[in-house]
Image (cartoon, grey):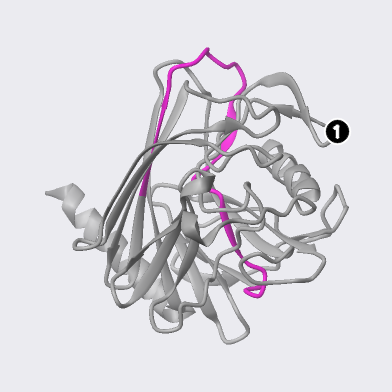
Amino acid sequence: MKKILSLVLLLCSSCIFAESKDSKDSWAYLDNGTVRIGIDRSRGGCIGFFGQSKTQRNLLNHFDEGRFVQQSYYGDKDGSNWNGNPWIYNPVQGGSWDKQPSRMLDFKVNQKDHSLYSKVEPRRWSSAKPCPEAIMEQQIKLKDNIASITFTMNYSGEDHNDERHQEMPAVFVDGALKKFYYSKEGKLVNEAPLILAEGAKAGKKGLGLGKSTSEWVAYVDDNQWGVGIYTPGTTDFTVYKALGDGTTGPDGSACSYVAPLRTFTLKKGLKVEYTVYMTIGSLKQIKSRFEALKAKQSLQEKK
């Protein structure tokens, strides 16, 4: 897993200087009275808002095109570079590092059943080349206090050789949520994430790679309240915190990052499809909801 860790550390060490300003008119939201989720249509329909309906405080970070809850895949070296750094084939849902947006192909929202669908042609992160060979879709649904997001990527490009650790998905949280927890054999584990200081290319000591046997992770505040992320069938994860200039909030330079990981190679005809669940609450509530959801899914699979 060291490959993906070195890539995301390099990514963060440079992108913290590339803030984007978005238009409020480009955002679309779903709100079921319990939770609220929002996507930025000008940046690949990426998820950049998640909060409680009553407070409408955004617990995510969308400082630049790379910092969203979104799809991003890694392939072979392609001779590209960005911001002076050698890079690889990397279609990103939100667009390129120099703010070239992905192309929205389809967008539908149904407020009655709290669902939203989008389809985009992504761009390579480094070169901004369009990626018609890696069409990405997402289907968002809200039910009670949980948001379910189904991501799909159909790849029709050339075969790649390198097996990569892939983000399932990339998740960027408000840097104010500093404490990282995961579940191991049903028990809560708290470890300090790897720290990346502004301008640094190497992280300070901390957890950079791990395994959550219960398949969920969370970022919370000092009161153990925050955001939980659950990708069924995905135990490995990579995690770090970027200090930036210290500013927190949705567009702050500081952020808390985590990504569940799966390992595979991009091959022609590959279809990637998975669902991630997100919720907001106390650590105890997050754990209880995801355990209940996992038990329900296990029963359905046995039928």
Residue located at (36% from left, 52% from top) = 149
Query: In the rendered image, which quarter contains the N terminus?
Result: top right
Examine the structure image and report whether residue 157 is included in the region drawn in magenta.
yes
Residue identifier under label 1? 84
Residue located at (43% from left, 68% from top) = 186
Work out whether residue 144 or residue 296 is closer to the camera in this orientation and state it: 144
Residue located at (70% from left, 31% from top) = 126
Residue 184 locus on image (x, y percent):
50, 63
Relative to 37, 114 lies left or right: left
- Dot 1 surroundings within 10 Å: few (below 14), some, or many (20 or more)? few
Residue 215 visible within the image: no
Examine the structure image and report whether residue 71 is included in the region drawn in magenta.
no
Q: Amino acid at mark 1?
A: Gly
Work out whether residue 264 or residue 65 is closer to the camera in this orientation and state it: 65
Identify the residue at the far bottom of this view.
223
Relative to 207, 71 lies left or right: left
User: At numbered mark 1, what does the secondary structure look like: helix, strand or loop?
Assistant: loop
Residue 110 locus on image (x, y percent):
24, 56
Relative to 42, 180 lies left or right: right
Residue 236 locus on image (x, y percent):
54, 48
Residue stretch rendered in magenta on the structure: 150-178
Q: Residue 171: name its quadrant.
A: bottom right
Residue located at (43% from left, 61% from top) = 38
Work out whether residue 218 or residue 77 is closer to the camera in this orientation and state it: 77
Number of numbered discs on residues: 1
Residue 134 visible within the image: yes
Measured along the vertical axis of the image, is residue 213 above or below residue 76?
A: below
Identify the residue at the far top of this view.
158
Relative to 278, 239 lies left or right: right
Residue 298 locus on image (x, y percent):
24, 54
